[in-house]
Image: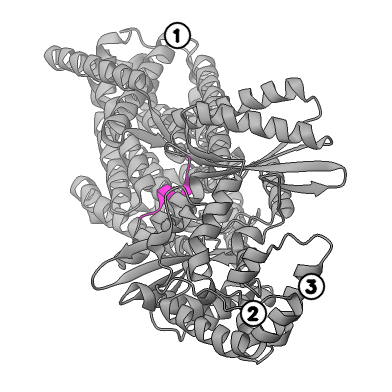
Amino acid sequence: MKSAALAWVVVVACLSAALVFQVHRGVKLQTDMTALIPAEDRDIAISRAKDRVAEILTERVFLLVGDHDRSLARAAGAQLAKTLTDSGLTRSVTYHVSSDALKSLGKMYFPYRFGLLADVDRERLQKDQGAQIVSRALASVYGPSSIVDAKLLRYDPFLLMPEFLNHLPMFSLGLTPDEGVLSTAEASLTWVLLVVQLRGDVYSGVFQKSFISALDAAIRQASAQTPNLEVLRAGAIFYAYAGSESATREASHLGAVSLIGSIALILIVFRALRPLWLTLLAIGVGILCAFTACFLIFGGIHVVALLFGIGLNGIAIDYCLQYISARFGPAAGAPDDRLRQVLPGITIGAATTLIGYVTLMLAPFPGLLQLALFSAVGLVGSFITIVLWLPFLDSREPLGRGTRILAMANSLWRFWEGAQWRTLRWSVIAAIGLATIVGASKMRTDDDIRHQQALAANLSAQESHLRRLTGVSGGTQFILVRAPNRDAALQTEEALRQRLADAQRLGALRGFESLAQFVPSVARQRDNRELVANKLMRPYLAAYYQRLGMSGDVPAGDDGFLTLDAIGNDSPIAFLRNLVLGFGARETIDLVLLMGVSQPKMIERSISQMPGVTFVDPTADITRLLASYRRRAMILIAVSALLMLPVLVFRYGLIDGLRVMLPPAIAVLVAPPLVALIGVPFTFFSAVALVLVLSIGFDYAVFCREATPARRPVTMLGIWLAMATTLSSFGLLALSSTSAVRTFGATLVVGTILAFAFSPFASSPTRNS
């Protein structure tokens, strides 16, 4: 026994060193709720597209800098742009759009000008309304602010190219170029826009802190020179950082409250320090093992697993409390005797609980795998510490006092067995049954991933304000376009473009972004040239030139056609390459980003008959996955019970094994309807909580089944303490600002109370020794 205890000392020392080394290297704290969900798209293209869209959206940050003085707003914007560029944390910071960049865009498009038509001009020519284009061109030539010169009129007489450029999506936002800066006005404020592309993992706590610290410092520096400066921000990194900070605060606060509550409870009951530090030692070693395992295997931990992990002592402490409670009374014996008294019960309890955790690992959820591993390793670490260390460290003297406490602890057992409590027992059972029926009628499911995470209200308000001012719309929905080649893909996008424009007019979405808006297909360019030649140049050019006092022919444009290859790396529209997912010999795959989708069903219906086109809504897909795995989790509970049953049957036989299963079964079945009475929906995280309720219920039931009549008071004291510490740890999760954590905590609280209340049912009525 001593050699085993020493060996465990060496193992714990090695794990401690590994944890210190890992913390020194840096720990990744994940905050993205979608990281909890498995990637289950069988279509590889859709899976890749989701990753690309997520990358595009998460790496982009929008900043809107405003002041009552236009020059101060522009100066602050320029200062922020320079500071962020120099920080090394960004790939690019777009603030000042140089005239050279805009000229390069015009230079790229101009050779192909007769094949490039704004939608409105193309429609006019198709309807033989070329005269309207002529009238517009004349108005531009003779207008008071005309910048048209003879050279432009010679090469583009009807000014088709400026009209095409003005209708590009990048110039259709609520922003206007102001001396090279995209700007907008609101009341007396002038706002200027910065678009930042981040260089780093948005969900890395280290990168979050570095970037936001740099940004905040830059804003403070700018505000020192411009006291009335206002800055609006929007981007996934801000929500991720706020979530990380909130989770860390919650974990520390809830952990502190739980620890203080457990310490106070143990001191009040045992009135000695040794039981306290033995409990803290067992739990501390378990948590050490759990964190080390997660960091070594996953390189970090998700905040949800962290928050659930603080409830580890709500499970592992059960076994420690059974041991230290055995010290009460003159028949307690030496530490080795106490361990022998409780070892069968805590071993079977740990085994059944581990089965529950292993069952969690069967669900293909990365977050659940972390939680299950954290809990399982922590439980094993605590259990080994209890068995190998506590008998050597514990006092040989029993606790002589505690008669009143033991009598109070045994009151639950007396309640279920005493004849004088028969009427009250049936009244309690009837009340629980009635509440269960009423709660079942009120139960509702909620699998929407957006409801499972808390978004900082101030960030949401800033983002809404920014999007209202700029017209920049966020959204994760997109359309996947697959075609045999590049031009076929562009033709499909052109057909899709009309349907999306119709949906936009009906309010189903605010906008969209596709390659075909910037680079028409070769077929469209060829058709545009014919329209311009036959419906504009031939019938109107001579008279138009005569009116302008010009003569001669219009020089021909480039004989070729505009393609995506013409877009250089420094082009203002270089971002279009993000929309190209795959371009090979057999298939071309493009993305069409959708913004501000309010009626996804309408969009899905409008494109359902288009070949090679797929509407993808990642949020809805995750919601469907949560619903599917909520149902699977319920199956896992049944699987857990079935896997636990052989252990119970081996120990107690079939009938008594089924009696041991009764209390946890009641807790699992009754907890969800009771929680529904207070308006908590049933979610996937509720189902996960029920897996743990099953494990906790088995612990309590096994302890009661193993207790002889003489040891019932001591056993019930340990169960009372275990329930109290579980409620003080897991129960506090019900106060979390994260809905998923809150739902988990509420379900676990009710389930634990039920498992505790019915735990004496596990004891055989015929057992007298």
Q: Name the residue nearer the viewer: 586 or 695.
A: 586
Q: Earlier in the sequence, mark 1 or mark 2?
A: 2
How many numbered badges does the structure rendering display? 3
Judge from the rendering whether residue 703 lies leftward or rightward of residue 450; answer left or right.
left
Q: Which residues are magenta?
A: 30-38
Residue at 41% x, 65% y is 628
Above or below: residue 74 compared with residue 131: above
Q: Position of residue 290 (x, y in %)?
A: 32, 29
- Per the image, is 37 magenta? yes
Identity, as a three-letter code, of the amino acid under mark 1: Leu
Q: How is the image coloured?
A: one colour
Mark 3 sits on what residue?
A: 139
Residue 614, percent from left and from top:
43, 74
Write the residue at 36% across / 21% down.
23
Does 341 sit left or right of 98 as displayed? left
Q: Are marks 1 and 3 in contact (CB under 8 Å)?
A: no
How far from the left and from the top, in percent, is residue 257? 57, 24
Q: Which mark is residue 392?
A: none
Which residue is depicted at the point 52% across and 73% down? Answer: 555
Q: Quadrant of residue 189?
A: top right
Instruction: Judge whether residue 41 can be spotted in this image.
Output: no
Residue in the foreground of this view, choosing between 446 and 516: 516
| Residue 291 visible to the viewer | yes
How far apart, in angstroms, are the residues tagged by discs 3 and 2? 16 Å
Q: Secondary structure at mark 2?
A: helix
| Residue type (three-letter) at the residue carrying disc 3 | Ala
Q: Which residue is mark 2?
A: 121
The disc, 3 or 2, on the residue closer to the chain's N-terminal end is 2
The residue labelled by disc 1 is 273
In the rendered structure, the answer to whether residue 414 lies left or right of residue 136 reads left
* Membership of 628 in magenta stretch: no
